[in-house]
Structure formats: structure tokens, C-alpha cells
Amino acid sequence: MLNFNFYNPTHIVFGKDTLQQLNELVPQDARVLVLYGGGSVQRFGTLDKVKGFLEGRAVFEFGGIEPNPKYDTLMKAVEIVKAEKINFLLAVGGGSVMDGTKFVSIASTYEGENAEALFSYGTVPESVAKCLPIGTVVTLPATGSEMNNGGVITSRLGKLAIFSPKAFPVFSILDPELTYTLPATQVANGVVDTFIHTVEQYVTLPTEARFQDRTAEGILQTLIEIGRKTIDEPTDYDARANLVWCATMGLNGLIGAGVPQDWTTHMIGHEITALYGIDHGKTLAVLQPSIWNVRRTQKQAKLLQYAERVWGITEGDADTRINQAIDKTRAFFESLGIGTHLSDYGVKPEGINDIVVALEKHGMTGLSETGDVTLEVSRQILEGAM
Ligand code: NZQ
Ligand code: ZN
């Protein structure tokens, strides 16, 4: 097992009717900015309930954070934070709202002139931006943003990840019932996003990290068990609760501690979303089978472990077993209604070059657990994903 630091201060409040705990979790004297997306929380009544539980505090609102949140939009929220002396941010929504809120938290305590400069840090130190405290109310299980310190923001510089040790939410409320109103395609995106977060920390190189491996396999098997069910029966509480908890545990640092990580799928996926507007989860479903096909030799030991322990594949030579594992993974994503080819989303072979150029521009020239995914390998992966 590799050395690691594991730090996660987020208080999780999970279950039915937990929204009311906002009243204890948000300080009584807080000046709160409630941030949300394009209107689902208004349509389905969550915003009114949130405001009810915050009664007695000075509450301000900022709506309109778009999927794949934009820098320019978020900077408008930063202005409100400064003008109204906000000292607590409450994100009510999915990954885009939570990520956007983290950026607002970082940018509103940054003293430099141009907040776009924050993207050059990757991890923004406390000496550069202190962060305002954040709470979240999760309405879409997928990204794990509710229990990690990262966000992904689109600006003129591209769709880039930003982290800060201070940007962990102080608390996150996970009431699976608040996610019942999601359209089927967003639930499917959430299953795939969680699946890919898990394999990017698991299908790498063996390091005898048995707890992390078994936990990752448990998440993957749970997703396979409940993925289709929670799409078909959105109000089945237990199926949805399992998705919500898997999504959080998939990217809160636990399964990634002490193991190599390979974020190739996400890094190429972010470029595809930035260029073509394809949902985050769908870009991942397109790329993962091709990545495993291209890098089957480097990942052989873990792909065989994945094949056996997650899918029960034990027969045949290594290549046969790996092919079966890739086929089963693709079939699982397709069974959720998610296309697994770039052509399913209207991307033409000529478009591949634009994606490779964007990867180069953002310095994504040595991806993977070993840094051997050069631009040429990325091109091969994209060609295999058509
Ligand atoms: O905007 P509204 O009207 O609220 O509608 C949203 C949005 O259109 C809708 N929605 C959310 N909750 C709903 C609902 N509709 C009905 N009922 C509900 N309960 O769903 C749509 C998609 O929302 P979004 O937040 O964009 O989706 P998701 O949670 O998948 O987040 C995707 C973003 O997270 C980033 C992605 O890159 C992408 O920008 N990621 C963040 C990560 C992190 N912070 O750790 C890691 C991830 O890998 C990912 O990169
Ligand atoms: Zn993701």
C-alpha cells in the first residue's frame, strides 16, 4: 500500500426528512447565500422548504448556476457575497451547483484582481484564498462533490478542476427522497459517474490495498445491482439510498487512499463536455471501454481482478477475460440508456483532432497512473470510442 494522508471533515446527515436539520447546522446568526441551478429546486418545492428551515437568518438567493458551471455566472454570486457580507454558502442542487458554490467560496475570499488566476493553482492554498464555509443539500447523486474539496468550472481557459483544502463542505444533507424528481437520464449519468470514479481509483496497478479494492468492488457491485432498478423505480427508497451513498463514497478520498489513481477518463471527458456540451457522465461511458482496450497490457492485473470479482469472469485466457469484462461494462452502461460511442452524440471523426488540441493546451499530455497516456495514446482512445 502507498503512503497517504486522509482528511475529510464533512459532516454527513443522511436519510428521510433530514432537511429540517438545516436549522441546527447553519449558525443562527449567519448571513446565508442559497445557491441553486436552473430552477428544479423551485419547481419541486425544495427551495421553499430550505428557506423555511433557515427562518430567522438573513437569507439571500442566487439561482441560475448552469450544468457545467461557468466562471462568469459564478462571479455574479461573488459580487453578492461581497456586497451583502455573506458568511455562509448553502448549495442546493447537483454537482454543478456544489462545484460552483465551492468556487464562489474560494473566489470571494481571494484578494487578487482576476479570479481566473485561481485556476493556475490546481490546489489553492489557504494563504491565497481562505474560503467561506459551505453546506450542501444534494439533489443529484453523482459527483461526490458533497464530500470532497474539488470543483470543475468552465471559463475562457477551459473546463478545469480547482481544489482547496478549505473547500470541503462543513455538512452535506443527503435525503434520497429529494432526488426522486430527477429525469431518468440524470440518474443514469449519476450511476455511470460513480462507477467511473470508482474504477479510476481501482483499475490501475496492484498495491495490496485490500480494503480499498474490496470497498471499490462493493461499490461497483452495488451499482450493478441497483442501477437499472433506481431508474425504473425512482421512488424505491432503498435502491436510491444505495446510489446516493455509493456516489458520496466513490469520491471522498476513502477508496483512493494508498492506491495509484488514473484520471484519464475524466480529463478527456471534460474536454469533450467543453467542446460538445455532452453530459459529464455520458462522456465517461464513451471513453472507459476504449481506454481499457488500449491500455489492457498496463492494467492487465487489475482488469483481471475486476473481471473476476465484479463480473465473475474466470474462464479463458487473459485477453478473452478482459474482452468480456469490457463488453459487460459497456452493456451495463447501455442497459441504463447511455450510449457508449462518440457517434451516438453526433461527434464526427474529424472532431477528434479538436479534443486532442484541447488536451495539449491544458497540459494533459501524460495522463494515467503511470503518465504514459500521451496525446497520441489519447487520439487512439478517441478513435476507439467512435
Ligand atoms: O439546474 P437545475 O434546474 O437544478 O436542473 C439540474 C440540471 O439540469 C437537474 N437536477 C438536479 N437535481 C434535480 C434535477 N432535476 C430534477 N430533480 C432534481 N432533484 O439535473 C441537471 C444536471 O445537474 P448537474 O448538477 O449539472 O449534474 P451532476 O451532478 O452530474 O454534476 C455534473 C458536474 O459536476 C462535475 C462535472 O464535471 C459537471 O460539471 N464534477 C464534479 C466533481 C467533483 N466536484 O468532485 C467530480 C465529477 O467527476 C465531475 O467532474
Ligand atoms: Zn465524474
Image (cartoon, rainbow, N blue to C red):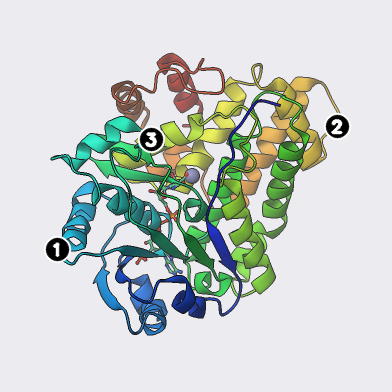
Residue 134 pos. (x, y %): 39, 59
Q: Kindly report the distance in space between the C-alpha atoms of the residues bearing marks 2 and 3.
A: 42 Å
Label 1 neighbourhood size at 10 Å, few (<14), some (14-19), many (20+)?
A: few
Residue 304 pos. (x, y %): 76, 28
**Nearer-N-terminus badge (1/2):** 1
**Nearer-N-terminus badge (3/1):** 1
Q: Amino acid at mark 1?
A: Ala
**Nearer-N-terminus badge (2/3):** 3
Q: Is residue 310 above or below residue 348?
A: below
The residue that appears at 74% across and 22% down in the rendered structure is 301
User: Disc 3 beta carbon < 8 A from ligand 1?
Assistant: no
Q: Are marks 3 and 1 in contact (CB under 8 Å)?
A: no
Residue 216 pos. (x, y %): 69, 42
Label 2 neighbourhood size at 10 Å, few (<14), some (14-19), many (20+)?
A: some
For this view, does 337 lie left or right of residue 94? Answer: right
For this view, does 357 lie left or right of residue 264? Answer: left
**Which residue is denoted by mark 3 in the rendering?**
123
Q: Secondary structure at mark 3?
A: loop
**Which residue is denoted by mark 1 in the rendering?**
83
**Which residue is denoted by mark 2 in the rendering?**
314
Name the quarter showing ligand 1: bottom left
Q: Amino acid at mark 3?
A: Thr
The residue that appears at 47% across and 52% down in the rendered structure is 145
Among the 4 quarters of the image, the one containing residue 228: bottom right
Which of pointers 1 and 2 indicates the residue nearer the eye? Answer: 1
Q: Secondary structure at mark 1?
A: helix
Q: Kindly report the distance in space between the C-alpha atoms of the residues bearing marks 3 and 1.
A: 27 Å
Q: Kindly report the distance in space between the C-alpha atoms of the residues bearing marks 1 and 2.
A: 62 Å
